[in-house]
Image: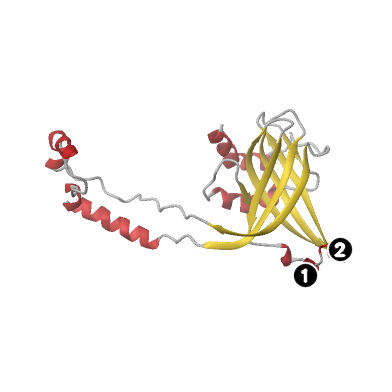
Amino acid sequence: MKILLLFLIAFSLPTLLQTQTSVKDEASPMTVSSYKWSRMRQTVENAAPVDANVPARQVIPQNKNFARNGRVNDPRGARDPNQDTLDGRSEALEKSVQESRAPKSEPRDGFAYRVKVKNASDKIVEIVFWEFQFSEAQNPDVVARRQFLCGVNIPGKKDKELEGFSLSGPSDVVSVGALADKSRFKENVLINRVEYSDGSIWQRKGWSLAEVKATYQRVLREPWVPGQCKGL
């Protein structure tokens, strides 16, 4: 199920941008019971570089069945004879170069956005697009939107807490003075799109899937964990 879910996330957008016949503009089938945001430091583990240029190991006498089986009883820490071959040294050098070029994991200061939702339908929800909005009471037309895409598995009539991380916070649109007094700015959460396991779709009127096409393609290149939300 988890593999199928990530497959659907990866390949649904191009098709859905072309046809939206399943979309309905009725009331949202997913209700929001609570939401909040907070400052958060997140450490991102960078994926190891793909080693596509490592040559096949040279066939040496020590790699033949008899010799290889005999090395099973070697003491712990015994040197692998493959390391002394030309291919072995080339592989070690290539690995060292790639590791030196790989970006290091670094903590990032940002914001966690959390929302608790309920699947009001009887169908299983697999994908949710949602957004957290901020606006100042005195300037309601200026709105900051933090949009997220979640790969989930929410059975009918069940609750689920979703969490997204973003480097951007409310201060991008709300002044520091307003942040000190929460009565001076407004928060809101909207469900933009819901996709079900049976292939049916609900989408909020006025929201377009095309507006997140570029960021959608970007997050697909990042590591995914089932149940995770990605910022758009």
Residue 232 seen in this snapshot: no
For residue 176, what is the image quadrant? bottom right
Residue at (72, 33) in percent of width and height: 158
200 w.r.t. 179: above or below? above
Q: Can you identify the residue that label 2 sits on?
A: 137
83 w.r.t. 2: above or below? below
Q: Secondary structure at mark 2?
A: loop
Mark identifier at residue 175: 1
Q: Split into 4 quadrants, where in the image is the N terminus?
A: top right
142 w.r.t. 230: above or below? below
In the picture, measured across the screen, residue 195 lies left or right of residue 102, that is right
In the picture, measured across the screen, residue 192 lies left or right of residue 183, that is left
Mark identifier at residue 22: none
Viewer-proximal residue among 36 and 166: 36
**Mark 1 Cα within 10 Å, few/some/many (few <14, many 20+)?**
some
Q: Secondary structure at mark 1?
A: loop
Residue at (55, 44) in percent of width and height: 225
Type of amino acid under label 1: Ser
On the image, the x and y values in percent for residue 42 come to 57, 58
On the image, the x and y values in percent for residue 231 come to 63, 53
Tell me, yes or no, whether the two marked residues, 2 and 1, touch with CB atoms within 8 Å.
no
Viewer-proximal residue among 132 and 70: 70
In the picture, measured across the screen, residue 12 lies left or right of residue 142, that is left
